[in-house]
Image (spheres, rainbow, N blue to C red):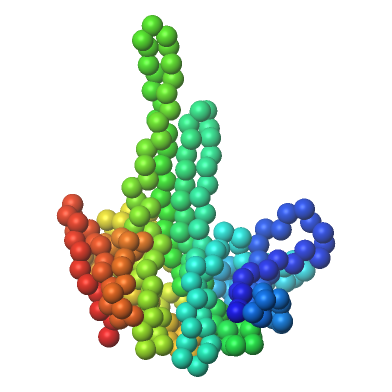
Amino acid sequence: TYVVGYYMNNSKGKTYVAGYSGLFMATLDADIQQQAIKFNEFGDEFLLNIYSGKKVENAAEKGKELKVPAPYTMDEIFIHEDGTFTVISEYFLETVTVDKGQKTTTTNYGNILYFKLDKDGNLLTADAIKKNQVSGTSSIGLSVTTGISMFISIELPDNRAKYWSYASSMNNDNIYIVFNDHFKNEGDGEDDLSKPMVNPKKSIPYLVTIAPEGTFTKSAMAESGDTETYLVPQVTYALSNSEFIIWGIYRKLNKFGIAKIK
């Protein structure tokens, strides 16, 4: 049995540590006793996928340790034919603020990180698939008078959040990830995003393919002008490793179809 997760360094004994220093893998026996553990500290090369080069350079000059932000959560583990495996992690943060009685909730689905490890827990590949999906909702205050004056606060639902995050699958040792992104964010994802994704009506679905050696490519699944069709990636149903049912929106119509990975 293997256990994989992030770990934090706290050599200075701080009461609060803002992020992760690296990735670990522990091996457990049949009695759930730890047999071995391997720690992999994140280096500057990987951190450049998350932070700007200037920020990484400034932190090194000041002797500060940059960390992977804590809102990254472990999502999935894919096992490859050669016994190695890939861990998928996504940034998710929900922030609530209150100002003058009005409550605002902001939801952010950010980058997807992936890590490939061998059977001994050694980190072979670490990279980031960049995206920045943001939406929010605010409460509405209503004054009601029925003999007694009352103030009622109603929070509207966030109808955009269901279009965020991603769907994933694995076939022939390749990992496939689908998500909505702004139609201007084309390319392989190595550069900073040109546009944050705040409106699904300005998005198109993208397919990211992670090859067995750990590299990835990003390609649009629709034309850049075809922003009337977008997916609901959190609602998918896998029929097999290469085929799954997807839910899409075209204008105001719900569309269901079968996506096939070749």
Asked whether 172 or 68 is in front, the reply is: 172
Screen quadrant of the N terminus:
bottom right
x and y, in percent, of residue 137 in the image: 41, 42
Task: Write the residue at 71% across / 77% down.
Answer: 34
Task: Write the residue at 41% across / 35% down.
Answer: 155
Screen quadrant of the C terminus:
bottom left
Task: Write the residue at 48% across / 62% down.
Answer: 110
Q: Determine the residue located farthest toward the bottom in the rendered image.
A: 82
Asked whether 88 or 134 is in front, the reply is: 88
Where 38 sits versus 186, above or below? below
Q: Determine the residue located farthest toward the right in the rendered image.
A: 12
x and y, in percent, of residue 162 in the image: 35, 55
x and y, in percent, of residue 86 in the image: 51, 80
Q: Determine the residue located farthest toward the front in the rendered image.
A: 31
Task: Write the residue at 55% across / 64% down.
Answer: 73
Asked whether 85 or 138 is in front, the reply is: 85
Where 78 sits versus 105, above or below? below
Can the viewer see residue 43 in this picture? no
Total marks shown come to: 0
Left/right of residue 178 with respect to residue 89 in the rendered view: left
Dividing the picture into quadrants, the one containing residue 148 is top left
Left/right of residue 92 with respect to residue 245 in the rendered view: right
Where 37 sits versus 203, above or below? below
x and y, in percent, of residue 118 in the image: 58, 88
Can the viewer see residue 106 in this picture? yes
